Image: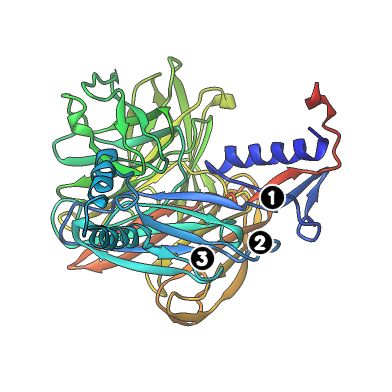
Amino acid sequence: MNRTTLSLIAGATALAAVTGFAAVSAPDPEAAGQRTGAAATLPVERTGLLCPRPSTSDLAETTYTSFTPVTEGADGKGTAVLRSAAQQSAPDENENEDAEGEDEKDGETTEKGDKDAAKDDKVDRPVLQLKEPGKPVSAEADGADAPALVGTADGRFASGWTAQQTTEVAAGTGRGLQGVACSAADTQFWFPGASTDDSRTDYIHLTNPDDSAAVVDIELYGKDGELETTVGEGITVKPRSAEPVLLSTLTAEKQTDVTVHVVVRSGRVGAAVQALDDETGGDWLPASADPSGRLVLPGIPKDAKAVRLVAFTPGDADVDLKVRLAAPSGLITPAGNETLHLKGGMTAAFDLGELTRGEAGSLVLTAPDGSVPVVAAVRVLRGEEGKQESAFIPAARPIETRATALDNTAKGTTLSVTAPEGGAEIKVTASAGTEGGTPQTKTYSIKPGTTQDIEAPVPAGLKGGYALTVETRSGGPVYASRTLASTEGGVPYFTVQPLPDDRGMVAVPDASEDLSVLQR
């Protein structure tokens, strides 16, 4: 095997680790202009996303949105398609055998062919398909039949591909606005902030994009440690399908605050928790950033009436978390909550009250010397008692290069950005609208240790929804979240999504690099 081939294999391996599944072709000499040392930074050329089933309510109205930003150096061809997970289910072998037998009967070949053609058309019909980078597309679905989606993007659509589903539920458990960004498949997830209490109906949604079954273990941790579960081990998720699991069916213990740990024994899945409350609506709880001694929870709404922090540290070590709020004026320590004590292996919850007090804010949690890893999320309430709505903000990953939020509207969209360590300059681009509009771009400076709710640009002549893409120009690290809000019947509907890096670029070793050591 020659050195060039080895270099490309190393690059493809790095891509697979970053995107769940990905591919890269030989570097285009013109596209490989961005270099760091011996590595070229190139656009990802294949990636995948998974969207959970939006709702079980017949009153639900869901909008799916898909978007890829324009990326310099990306391939000139490609596709980005999201299809129903149910439509992609693997065919039953017995059904195929029966069909083949029918084909052999006289006079039935044409009828069988017509049925197969109709079936294939249904399976292949996409829910969403992008036509060009830089312009989002959307689709509507009503009621409980809105499906989970499985999708892939390649070529010019792969780098930075983002998808989102936003659902409004008019009444009942979980009423309000629920939003979640579609995510890549992985093999481990942490969800602090879930519940098995009678007032909550929490599901862990598992979506398998592959042709073979995935086997998943679900561990639950409460205030006294791991909860005894009856059917949490060895859960099978069928090929190319979605499986919602009601958390309260996994254990007899009723606890208000639970940390969910999803571990995939074989295969890989996408995972998200849908947390629905009888009185305060509900929203999606995305996975927390990986356990770390330093966490940032960005973009707590400035009018939050109550903020409840739920945190968990794996293992046996206790830790005293230092708590700070990154406000517009800088880092401050909330009175009475300077430090929070966590016991190893036990979920802890802390009521922080009206933490933001009318100003933009982000929580910054730090373990001494960063020595004890922690996962965390906050539950936020807005509105007056009796007319409140809830949402969740997990610990987020930084925007290393670029991130995108979808389904934005001219009113009701808040983009919150924090730079907890050092100042940063960012560029924010508002895309064309789904039905028309001209992109707009602005740059902003974020002061060290602050959070800012920035006045994001809006496309000129906007029609429909649009995408907001945030790019880090200098400084950082930068964290961000986007809030969508509206008011229905006096209830402040809202949903918050942290913006993870879109992982659209990857460093590929230069073909001339000496990798002869790999030949030994």
Instruction: Measuring from the top left, give residue 401's x and y in whole percent.
Output: 63, 53
Vertical position of residue 426 compared to residue 218: above or below: below
Residue to which mark 3 is pinned: 468
Residue to which mark 1 is pinned: 25
Residue at the (35%, 68%) spot, across then down = 139
Local crowd size for mark 1, using a 10 Å CA cut-off: few (<14), some (14–19), many (≥20): some
Instruction: Measuring from the top left, give residue 407's x and y in whole percent.
Output: 40, 66
The residue lying furthest to the bottom in this view is: 461
Q: Secondary structure at mark 3?
A: strand
Instruction: Give the residue type at disc 2.
Output: Asp
Distance from Cα at disc 3 to Cα at disc 1: 29 Å
Instruction: Give the residue type at disc 1.
Output: Ser
The residue lying furthest to the top in this view is: 316
Residue to which mark 2 is pinned: 75
- Residue 487: quadrant of the picture: bottom left
Q: Are marks 2 and 3 in contact (CB under 8 Å)?
A: no
Q: Is residue 517 left or right of residue 179?
A: right
Of mark 2 and mark 1, the one earlier in the sequence is 1
